Amino acid sequence: MAPIGVVLEHTPLSLAQRRVLVNDRPVAVASREVGDQDRIALAEELPEIEVIHETPEWVAVNKPAGMPTQPPRDRKRRSLEEILRVEHRQLFVVHRIDTQTSGVVVFAKTRAAAVELSSLFASRAIRKSYLAVIEGALTHELTIESPVGGRDAHTIIRPLRPLSGATLVEAEILTGRTHQIRIHLAEAGHPVIGERVYDRALVGRPVSAPRLMLHEMK
């Protein structure tokens, strides 16, 4: 065991700015002891995260595409949670969206809010809706109810605007299975533009967009 100030003796400014993370949480006390199993990281040059709305109980932010909501196992990418912890001493994850998906993510700032928000998400009292650009023309509402990962899954797709060779749609999910919208749209023959996993027709041709064109808007 050694004080963090000894381990990071050349980073006093980072400590003062709460940019030193121990086990994904910011610290500002150089005398705190850390062990061999503790994860230490410097949150330098952090990307700016758009705050959509904030109250004393929760904060809603716009997650960029390509950023994980929580720290990934390989620790190669800075997560949204880690970035927000630099500014918020206490933060609770109450839901997640895919790394490749952009959009609204809500974090609780108190334990009471975390319990309430988790209950609202679990009971589906909070409506989950997404914007997506999909391949091909879709002119009518589509309901998809095929299982995802062996569990029931229910997605409603509503066309909003025709595009050149594609369609802007709203996707509402009544269940929260991993990659549900992406899987259902690919099964329906209208994969999300930029899909790299579930679009079987993608083999042998380049991806048509620099990112997955899927955005959670709540």
Image: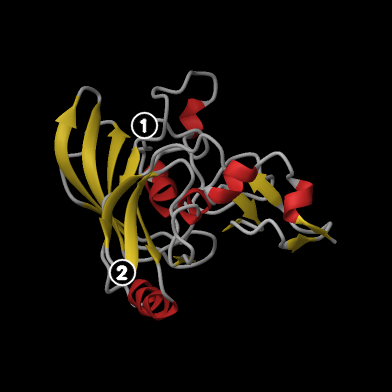
Labelled pair 2, 1 in contact (Cβ < 8 Å): no
Q: In this view, does 83 lie above or below 135?
A: below
Q: In this view, does 92 lie above or below 213?
A: below
Mark 2, other Cα within 10 Å: few <14 / some 14–19 / many ≥20 = few
Quarter assignment of residue 120: bottom left
In percent of width and height, residue 45 lies at 51, 34
* Residue 218 shows in the view: no
Lateral position of residue 48 relative to residue 66, left or right: left
For image coordinates 35% across by 35% down, the residue present is 213
Report the label total. 2
In percent of width and height, residue 23 lies at 66, 58
Disc marking residue 56:
2
Q: Quadrant of the N terminus?
A: bottom right
Mark 2 residue type: Pro
Mark 1 residue type: Ile
For image coordinates 33% across by 71% down, the residue present is 57
Distance from Cα at disc 2 to Cα at disc 1: 38 Å
In percent of width and height, residue 149 lies at 54, 60
In percent of width and height, residue 32 lies at 71, 62
Disc marking residue 7:
none
Residue closest to the eye, 215 or 16: 16
Residue closest to the eye, 176 or 70: 70
Residue with the mark numbered 1: 193
**Residue projecting furthest to the top:** 205
